[in-house]
Each structure stands twice: as structure tokens, then as C-alpha cells.
Image (cartoon, rainbow, N blue to C red):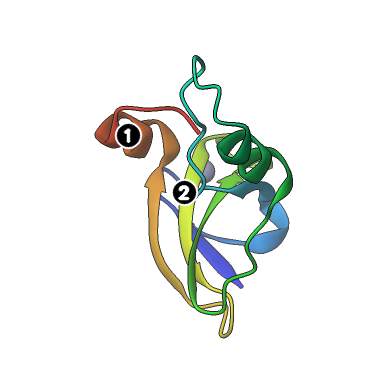
């Protein structure tokens, strides 16, 4: 599998480290909604199809990326810098 780093171009998967699910949003720090915190901390979806994931180009430029990958075919649909994607939604994971 190749991941196309925005800085370095297409590189082998072995140069990257998986950093977790990028689709989850952390509840507001002041929230006392126990169910929302429980879901954020303990529940992990296992989607079949396109999924947003954090990856780091650890053997390259070390950039943190959001990769949209199809979990059924491993096809990569989109790669963006994590910082830019988080800025666009105005939050932190
Ligand atoms: Zn890179």
C-alpha cells in the first residue's frame, strides 16, 4: 500500500505509523455528559468502507496526516495535513 504524503509524494506504508481514528470528536471539556465521554473513551467503531485515520510519516518528514482509506479495499481516497483539517472544523480530536 502506498500513501501519498503531501510533502514527500507516494511512499510505502512501512514509512508511516497509524495514530488512530480521526473521525471521533472529543466532547467539550466542560461537558458532564457521561454517555458522550464513555463513547469517546471506550467505544471504537469498526466501519466497512471509507474511514478517516491519523497517520504520521515517521520515516520521512514526520508530518501528521489524515488519510481517508477504504477499510474493505485499502484504497486511499484523500491525504491531508492533520493540522489543516482540524483547523477547518475548529476543534481538536
Ligand atoms: Zn512526508
Secondary structure, mark 1, is: helix
Give me the residue at 55% from left, 30% from top.
33
Per the rendering, the mark at residue 66 is 2
Left or right: where does residue 17 sit relative to residue 86? right
* Farthest-out residue, top: 30
Q: Can residue 35 be seen in this view?
A: yes
Give me the residue at 49% from left, 44% from top.
65
Toward the viewer: 38 or 25?
38
Secondary structure, mark 2, is: strand
Residue 52 place in picture, x, y as percent: 48, 57
Left or right: where does residue 8 sit relative to residue 46? left
Left or right: where does residue 66 sit relative to residue 12? left
Toward the viewer: 47 or 35?
35
Toward the viewer: 36 or 70?
36
Do the residues bearing badges 2 and 1 touch, measured as CB atoms within 8 Å? no
Between the residue at mark 2 and the residue at mark 1, the CA separation in whole angstroms equals 10 Å
Residue 17 place in picture, x, y as percent: 70, 48
Of the image marks 2 and 1, the number of the one nearer the N terminus: 2
The residue at which mark 1 appears reads as 84
Residue 77 place in picture, x, y as percent: 39, 70
Per the rendering, the mark at residue 44 is none
Q: Which of the 4 image quadrants contains residue 42?
A: top right
Give me the residue at 52% from left, 62% from top.
3
Residue 56 place in picture, x, y as percent: 60, 42
Toward the viewer: 1 or 93?
93
* Farthest-out residue, left: 88
Amino acid at each position: 500500500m502506498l500513501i501519498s504524503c503531501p510533502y514527500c509524494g507516494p511512499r510505502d506504508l512501512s514509512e508511516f505509523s497509524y495514530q488512530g481514528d480521526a473521525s471521533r470528536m472529543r466532547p467539550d471539556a466542560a461537558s458532564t455528559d457521561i454517555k458522550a465521554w464513555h463513547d469517546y473513551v471506550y467505544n471504537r467503531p469498526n466501519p466497512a468502507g471509507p474511514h478517516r485515520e491519523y497517520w504520521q510519516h515517521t520515516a520521512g518528514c514526520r508530518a501528521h496526516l489524515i488519510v481517508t482509506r477504504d477499510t474493505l479495499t485499502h484504497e486511499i481516497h484523500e491525504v491531508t495535513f492533520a493540522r489543516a483539517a482540524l483547523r477547518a472544523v475548529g476543534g481538536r480530536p
